[in-house]
Amino acid sequence: MPTKKPEIDLKARVVKLREAIEHHRYNYHVLDKQDISEAALDSLKRELAEIEQAHPELRDSNSPTNRIAGEPLKEFEKVEHKVPQWSFNDAFTEQDIRDFDGRVKRQLKQELGDTKDVAAPTYVCELKIDGLKVVFEYEKGQLVRAATRGNGKVGENVTFNVRTIESVPLTLREPVDIIVEGEVWMGKTNFEKLNKRQEKEGLPLYANPRNVAAGSIRQLDPRVVAERKLDTFIYDIASYTASAKETPTTQYDELELLRSLGLKVNNHAKVCTSIDEVIEFWKKWQTASKKQDYWIDGVVVKVNEVEYQKALGYTGKAPRFGIAFKFPAEQVTTVVEDIRLQIGRTGVLTPVAHLRPVLVAGSTVSRATLHNEDEIRRLDVRVGDTVILQKAGDVIPDIVQVLTELRTGKEKVFKFPTHVPECGGDGLIERIPGQSAWRCVVKDSDAQQKRRLYHFVSKHCFDMDGVGPRQIDLFMEHALVSSYEDIFTLTKGDLLALPRFAEKSADNVIESIEKARKVTLPRFIFSLSIPHVGEETAEDLAKHFKTLPQLMKATQDQLLQIEGVGDILANSIVDWFKTKEHREIVDRLLEHVHVLKFETAAIPKGATSLLGKTFVLTGTLETMSRDEAKEKIKSLGGDVSGSVSSKTSYVVAGEEAGSKLDKAQELGVKVLSEDEFIELIRVS
């Protein structure tokens, strides 16, 4: 049921974008309030810049794309910077940073000619700390002034507050005149402690450490700042009068000089001899950043040679010799072009937002699930809306917020239809009693059967390598397959008659089907698409009943004896196997496949057994996949369950852990971090 894509009035869009960006930038930089993430704000700015670049007639000298920063607060004395404070342009992709490298080399050749080896400048990579920029001025080695960046020309005098930060030396190790730039930040550990105090006192929680650092520096009472235990990293010299020390000739030498003067410098800077090394450093720190106590949102890349920096100079708002290479955003903005209903393998209809394609968390996405009707109402998401899209790791992207301030009045409210043609029959749909979900009235439509077949051949079921949705569609289109058992009747000749099938691909498919004729009991159960039976539940059922016949004749009372099985799930299993058509499906399948009796995996000789220990996995693990973690637990004799109960031994909590973590904490079940889990299985 595609609907017509909303027409975009570019002029109106530009006006709305500018208003929204200025609103959020003012809140973020001046008031230290954050209504949306910095990544989402970057996404809005990027869209505006792209429109202005493509349509010069829409450019405006007062556009946010030409603005360096916000205005200083009125509560503090204004300080005019002796050296203008610039902001870096951003790079978001590998191509962006390669383009930067190309520009640097071309401009150096233009400025310096062939008299020097300008074709291969080196770069210094420094971690981009997510804090508040402060400019520190020392005279004869004594701290005389500290000021916020402000609008780049005028900042706020925050000297008294900065003096409370222990990592800021009040006297340098050499009596030099120097102006340095750095970041003031709050550690994650102190941030968590602060929020616990806020919660205990019934006060609002802080959004993130960056906001706390900025708000603390602007406190009128220095004692409050001292209590917050802020920290700093100094990363640049804005002005320097040499005395005992010589003027540095490279950016890396600058860092060494800063460190020798007694200023705190981050230890992870690296000199890279090529842009490939820069990209490698950037990739490494996307993961490594999570283990630091400070927030890192990218890598600052600067030409190392000071002589080259001077030759490259500045644009109207940024240095040409440096760039902020940001990590892939987990939040971006995009536009909902349509909302369509997708039929699942059990007939449930899921609303899916079709989006203007956008790069998020390192991959381009054009779909986001809206879950159900209640979620659409909660978000008030409409066709044509600008939304914030969030994606973390391999998690399916979600729409987390609608930017209603960008609405033009042309957005369309989505309403669930009464009929969906893909459901089969007359296409009638119905609301599932007691739920906010809808389903097809006709239970055996082509669309549902396709999805059941996709599931049947997938990795976690029969694992038919080379047989996926595209092949299933082709088989059904040519009337070769309409049910599970049909797959096992295919011959090489059948396949060679199909378009895009050659000898090799046909052989591979047949070989994969033959390998699948022996299947474990958990995989067989999961492949049947029994409502509410997921992969881990299938494992629990197989472990309890051992054989398929025992499961097929199980009563509700027998099922309720299994950990994690409740009334709804037990009823679903009993009802499914009671249905004549379903029993016939199983019988026909058993003519072609052999279901192995369930056996507990053998424990490696010499290993300490995890026998009797039940694990629940939640969230995303960085060092291994969920499947790898499950296999490791099972190989050591442990069990993996899909639900948390008082009998659960451990809950392994990765990134973005959800309700299972909450349940574990409620029941007092031991929670393992990923590092603790790895250590446990390492010594087992």
Image (cartoon, rainbow, N blue to C red):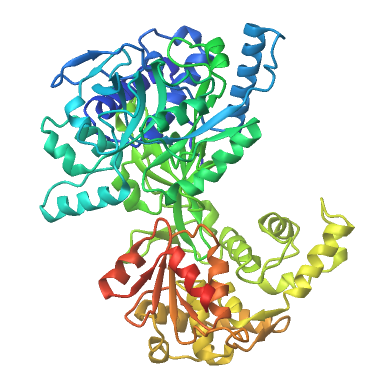
Q: Does residue 451 appear in the picture of this structure?
A: yes
- Tell me if residue 361 comes above or below residue 466 in the rendering: above
Q: In this view, does 179 lie to the left or right of 424?
A: left
| Residue in the foreground of this view, choosing between 408 and 230 | 230
Q: Residue at x 41, y 33 (%)?
A: 259
Q: Is residue 496 left or right of residue 57?
A: right
- Image position, residue 270 (x, y; %): 55, 36
- Image position, residue 236 (x, y; %): 42, 25
Q: In this view, does 14 lie to the left or right of 342?
A: left
| Residue in the foreground of this view, choosing between 642 and 649 | 649
Q: Which residue is drawn at 12% across and 38% down?
A: 223
| Residue in the foreground of this view, choosing between 669 and 570 | 669
- Tell me if residue 309 comes above or below residue 474 in the rendering: above
Q: In this view, does 196 lie to the left or right of 279?
A: left
- Tell me if residue 268 comes above or below residue 640 in the rendering: above
- Image position, residue 359 (x, y; %): 52, 37
